[in-house]
Image: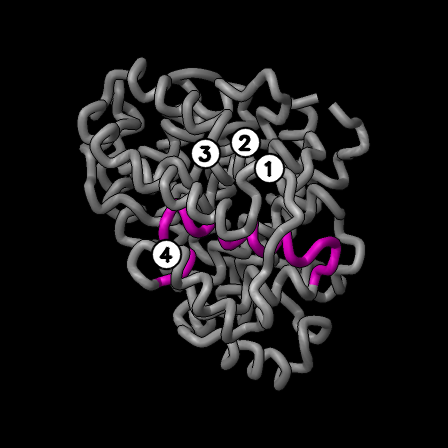
């Protein structure tokens, strides 16, 4: 593995995921704003990104970061297997006590209410055909930081599938967790971003399917509902000319905030961009491909659009921090972020466990 990913990159990944969340959320104002151009207008009136102090009370993190921290803090216990899954379930239940004003989604609320961390197998919930949302994707980036090596793919997939299914048992939901975890692992490996989507389809999804069959839970329903996620990702890779994993990326012209709103809607399951497990990582990847090392451009694409903007930003910004650190990020965006210490602390522990 390329050793140039340092503990500082891990810290930047975890911290900036929280920053992307707080900025994209804007205390409920932007997550529920359906117009990217309107958000960009408000951003300008605030003085642009370099003027935003992402701190309490105006810029809290949302449920995304609370549950991402729950996943990360379970992983750094060093537990594995069933013991780890019970630990994650316990921390999700605890995390739900910290949801005042943070707007968790319906599948997360339902799934976590059904978890029984103290009971054998209590990390499994009944199959939910509605569990297609992005709630599993937005809290799984840290799994790729725990299992970043290519030879750890089966561990990464198993943990992402099982923790994802705790709230989102539908494959469109839990494969989103696989995508987020895989993309951060690829960032650590310095794989070209143009190859990430193909890796998801050709490397991770087959491993996930085999795992589902071997785990023996809700196999029939899962296989019945499997195709949407992979079909939509194939469609996206065709759209961007990335089916071979190499590029160059084909972009619409122009591709500003208004055009991106329309494009992201076309990625979506039901017209709410980034709300589902397949398209939250898809928008994050689209933003990473288009922004390069430019933080403002990344946030413009991943965090300030007329969709589930905090959930797309939390994924994109974690990957971006792993690739680029905090260089070029205004200090006011992160210096007093809510839960900064916990985010950086778990990053340090994840780094130590994975190296």
Mark 2 vs mark 3: in front: 2
- On the image, numbered disc 2 is attached to which residue? 199
* Residue 227 placement, left or right of 248: left
Q: Position of residue 185 (x, y in %)?
A: 61, 32
Residue in front for this viewpoint, 174 or 220: 220
Label 4: state its secondary structure: loop
Instruction: Assign the C terminus to one quadrant of the image.
Output: top right
Helix, strand or loop under label 1: loop
The correct choice, above or below, for 174 with respect to 19 in the image is above
- Magenta segment boundaries in residue numbering: 272-295
Q: Residue at x 63, y 30 (%)?
A: 350
Residue 273 within the segment the image draws in magenta: yes
The first of marks 2 and 3 along the sequence is 3
Q: Is residue 89 shown to the viewer in this render? A: yes
Residue 289 pos. (x, y %):
63, 51
Q: Is residue 55 visible?
A: no
Q: Residue at x 72, y 43 (%)?
A: 323
For mark 3, give the secondary structure. helix
Quadrant of the image occupied by residue 81: top left
Q: Is residue 270 above or below residue 154?
A: below
Q: Residues within 10 Å of mark 1 (few under 14, many from 20)?
A: some
x%, y% of residue 253? 59, 69
Quote the CA–CA distance across marks 1 and 2.
8 Å
Label for residue 151?
A: none
To which residue does mark 3 refer? 178
**Residue 101 belongs to the span the image colors magenta:** no
Task: Report which residue position mark 1 lands on.
Answer: 245
1 vs 3, front mark: 1
- Residue nearest the observer in this picture, 186 or 215: 186
Q: Of label 1 and label 2, which has the lower sequence position? A: 2
Which of the two labelled residues, at mark 4 and mark 3, occupies the earlier sequence position?
Answer: 3
């Amino acid at each position: 593995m390329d050793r140039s990913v340092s503990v500082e990159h891990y810290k930047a990944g975890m911290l900036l995921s929280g920053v992307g969340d707080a900025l994209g959320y804007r205390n409920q104002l932007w997550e529920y704003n359906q117009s990217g151009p309107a958000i960009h207008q408000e951003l300008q009136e605030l003085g642009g990104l370099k003027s935003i102090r992402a701190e309490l009370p105006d810029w809290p993190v949302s449920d995304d970061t609370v549950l991402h921290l729950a996943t990360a803090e379970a992983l750094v216990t060093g537990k594995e297997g069933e013991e780890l899954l019970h630990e994650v379930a316990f921390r999700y239940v605890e995390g739900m006590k910290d949801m005042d004003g943070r707007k968790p989604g319906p599948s997360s609320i339902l799934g976590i209410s059904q978890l029984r961390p103290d009971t054998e197998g209590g990390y499994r919930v009944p199959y939910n055909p509605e569990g297609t949302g992005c709630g599993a994707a937005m809290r799984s980036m840290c799994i790729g930081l725990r299992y970043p090596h290519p030879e750890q793919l089966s561990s990464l997939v198993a943990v992402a599938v099982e923790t994802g299914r705790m709230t989102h048992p539908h494959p469109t939901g839990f494969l989103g967790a696989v995508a987020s975890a895989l993309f951060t692992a690829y960032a650590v490996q310095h794989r070209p971003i143009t190859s990430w989507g193909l890796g998801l389809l050709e490397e991770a999804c087959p491993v996930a399917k085999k795992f589902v069959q071997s785990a023996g839970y809700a196999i029939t329903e899962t296989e019945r509902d499997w195709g949407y996620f992979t079909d939509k990702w194939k469609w996206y890779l065709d759209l961007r000319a990335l089916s071979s994993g190499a590029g160059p990326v084909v972009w619409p012209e122009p591709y500003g905030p208004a055009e991106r709103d329309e494009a992201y809607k076309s990625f979506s399951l039901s017209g709410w961009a980034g709300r589902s497990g397949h398209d939250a990582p898809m928008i994050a990847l689209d933003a990473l491909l288009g922004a390069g090392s430019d933080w403002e451009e990344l946030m413009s694409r991943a965090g300030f659009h007329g969709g589930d903007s905090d959930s797309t930003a939390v994924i994109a910004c974690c990957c971006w921090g792993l690739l680029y650190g905090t260089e070029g990020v205004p200090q006011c965006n992160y210096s007093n972020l809510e839960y900064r210490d916990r985010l950086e602390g778990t990053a340090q522990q994840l780094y130590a466990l994975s190296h």
